[in-house]
Amino acid sequence: MVRVGVIGCGKIAQVRHIPEYLDNKDSELVGLYDMNQERANNLADKYHCKAYKSVEDILNEKEIDAVSICVANNAHASITLQALNAGKHVLCEKPMATTIEDCEAMVNTAKEKRKILMIGQNQRFAKAHVEAKKLLRQGEIGDVITFKTTFGHGGPETWSVDSGPATWFFDKKRAAMGVMADLGIHKTDLIQYLLDDVVVETTSKIVTLDKKDSSGNLIGVDDNAICIYRMKKGAIGTMTASWTYYGEEDNSTILYGTKGIMKIYDDPSYCIEVIRKDGGKIFYNIDQIQTNDKQTKSGIIDAFVEAIKTNKEPPVSGESVLNAMRAVFGSMKSSESGISVKVNEEVVL
């Protein structure tokens, strides 16, 4: 039995981490911590576990083997390092951290302490993405030449546990980055996963166009990101992330290959559509993508628990996310400088 604690009891903890630990027969939810003590107390009463009064208290608990870290972006690295040094396995929400140096420190410390570090890149677990990867490896559309991958919705202020313009997602000090860190990291990680490839160059515009804070001023973090990625194997394509898609979410990926086209989560009726070079079409009806309004089991928690049980590398290790984070930081640099930025190619897939 893997005994777990959850640090940060906001929306992602409430809709994913806590219920998925409770649903896993090999895990036991021991305790919770949140800066809002009342929130932690209420959830602990609801789920019959213990509410801790500090990060240190929950990490010093000998009954806890592993923790989920579901706090604001700026605290991911510091709490992850504390947890690893306390001998805990760690599942950290995305984005991994707010600097590449912190990301690398997290990976190195996990290796040094011989503990599992997994990152919550749940797009890799979506059934259509898993199936699409298989089809691509089988050569269903040949070699991918270009692509476009998109993730957009109406913004975190409609979803965060503390809803409205005062959400921490809009606070530069706590979030550090905006939509690029919230949604852009998902699709950057996904395109590398699907193509078995890595981003080596980015040309980006990361801007704030519409979102306003409680004073009516534009927020201090980005609400739109458009990046042109060049992959190591030669494909190029766009990655678009937006908090200003009002009315309908878009979580689609379209791949253009030498033998045809693959559309993933582009049609509400079919999760994958393959259009062959001769015009023939194949439709797959496996599942539909999660949305903010429709949350389904992610697979992240089950994979984390299984990795701890078997003492094996998790399917989304911290090390495997490093180059996606390098691409994110490189894109920020590209947008600031107005030039293309090369991404470190010395990575492990």
Image: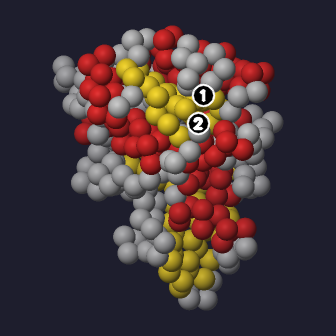
Residue under label 2: 2
Q: Is residue 224 visible?
A: no
x 19%, y 22%: residue:
214
Q: How many marks?
A: 2
Q: What crowding class fits label 1: few (fewer than 14 Cα within 10 Å), some (14-19), or many (20 or more)?
A: many
> Which percent across, then down, holds residue 23?
45, 48
Query: In this orientation, which residue lies closer to the viewer: 183 or 61?
Result: 61
Horizontal and vertical percent position of residue 215: 18, 19
Is 288 on the left or on the right of 335, as rendered? left
In the image, is residue 310 above or below residue 211?
Answer: below
- Asked if residue 160 shows in the view, the reply is yes
Residue lying at 41% horizontally and 38% vertically, measured from the top left: 18
Q: Secondary structure at mark 1?
A: loop
The N terminus, quarter of image: top right
Q: Which residue does the numbered mark 1 point to in the structure image?
A: 65
Task: Say if mark 1 contacts mark 2, CB within 8 Å.
Answer: yes
Which residue does the image show at 60% across and 68% down from the upper left? 131
Residue 173 sits in quarter: top left
**Amino acid of disc 2:** Val
Residue at 30% in and 22% down: 41
